[in-house]
Image: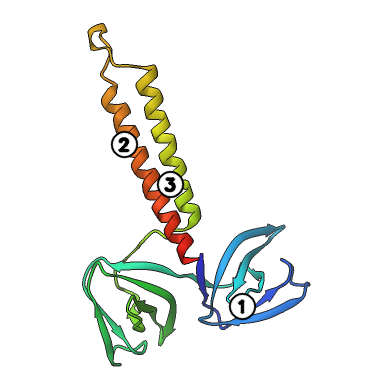
Amino acid sequence: MRASLGDDSARVWQEPNAESISMTSIHKGEEFEIGKVIRKKKEVWVTVTLDNGVTGYISGDTHIFAIQKVEAVGNDLELYKEPDASSEVLATIPKKTLFTVRGVETVNDESWYRAETDDGAQGYIKSGARLRAKPQVTKESARRMMITGALFAVGGAVLYFLFPSNPEAGGGDTSFISLGLILLGLFQLFQGFIQYRQQGKKE
């Protein structure tokens, strides 16, 4: 998952231990990939990979912000040049239009989201806006969708062949249920395959 640093700075350690070598420091707003969370005794560490390829660990107490695609649920949103309602309005983001939230900043006790539109405009929106996150598609999520789809399809096929409909004997009609499971499974399998290929091309 992609994230940005919310604190002013944070050290990246070689091992999940503050007594290990400090490899580098990251600063507020810098972006990186987060990986596994490691718990050692009473300490929590987060694996991070920086854009320069360095992989290390940051303390679990570090404030990080998950970068994600969102859309406005209520009204259109104003994208300001600065985290100030009196600054220049760079663009208006229509509701139900996807954009990326990359961080949050607090100015004069007021929080602002650091945002970027799909056409590259970068600015700030007020944090009180009603937003809905779009689930992040990764190779792993696509793989899980393919597996789930395959299980539905196989389950439907098993139900169809092992428990055939026999209304004359007083049994229920299982053909519609089994065919529905097969179709649902094939749809998820195909959708997961498309997403997997798309993520592969991005990489």
Whichever of labels 1 and 2 marks the residue nearer the N terminus, that label is 1
The amino acid type, in three-letter code, at marker 1 is: Asn
Give the structural element (helix, strand or loop) at label 3: helix
Q: CA distance from mark 2 to mark 3?
A: 14 Å
Query: How many C-alpha atoms fall within 10 Å of the one at disc 1: few (<14), some, or many (≥20)?
Result: few
Q: Which residue is mark 1?
A: 52
Where in the figure is residue 136, as x and y percent of width and height? Answer: 42, 60
- Find disc 3 in the rendering and name its residue: 145
Marked residue nearer the N-terminal end (2 or 3): 3
| Mark 2 closeness class: few <14, some 14–19, many ≥20 residues within 10 Å | some
Q: How is the image coloured?
A: rainbow
Q: Secondary structure at mark 1?
A: loop
**Which residue matches tag 2?**
183
Between marks 1 and 2, how big is the CA–CA gap? Answer: 44 Å
Which is more toward the observer, 43 or 135?
135
Q: Amino acid at mark 2?
A: Leu
Query: Relative to the observer, which residue lies in front, 96 or 151?
Result: 151
Picture coordinates of residue 156 (x, y %)? 37, 29
Picture residue at 37% right of the left edge, 46% below the top: 190
**Mark 3 or mark 1, which has the lower sequence index?**
1
Label 2: which secondary element: helix
**Residue at horizontal 62%, vertical 60%?**
37
Place residue 155 in its image quadrant: top left
Picture disc at residue 5: none
Between the residue at mark 3 and the residue at mark 1, the CA separation in whole angstroms equals 31 Å
What is the crowding at mark 3: few (fewer than 14 residues within 10 Å), some, or many (at least 20)?
many
Residue 94, percent from left and from top = 22, 73
Q: Position of residue 202 (x, y in %)?
A: 46, 66
**111 lies above or below 165:** below
Q: Which residue occupies 40% across, 35% down?
A: 152
The residue lying furthest to the bottom in this view is 87
Residue at image location 48% in from the left, 49% down from the top: 143
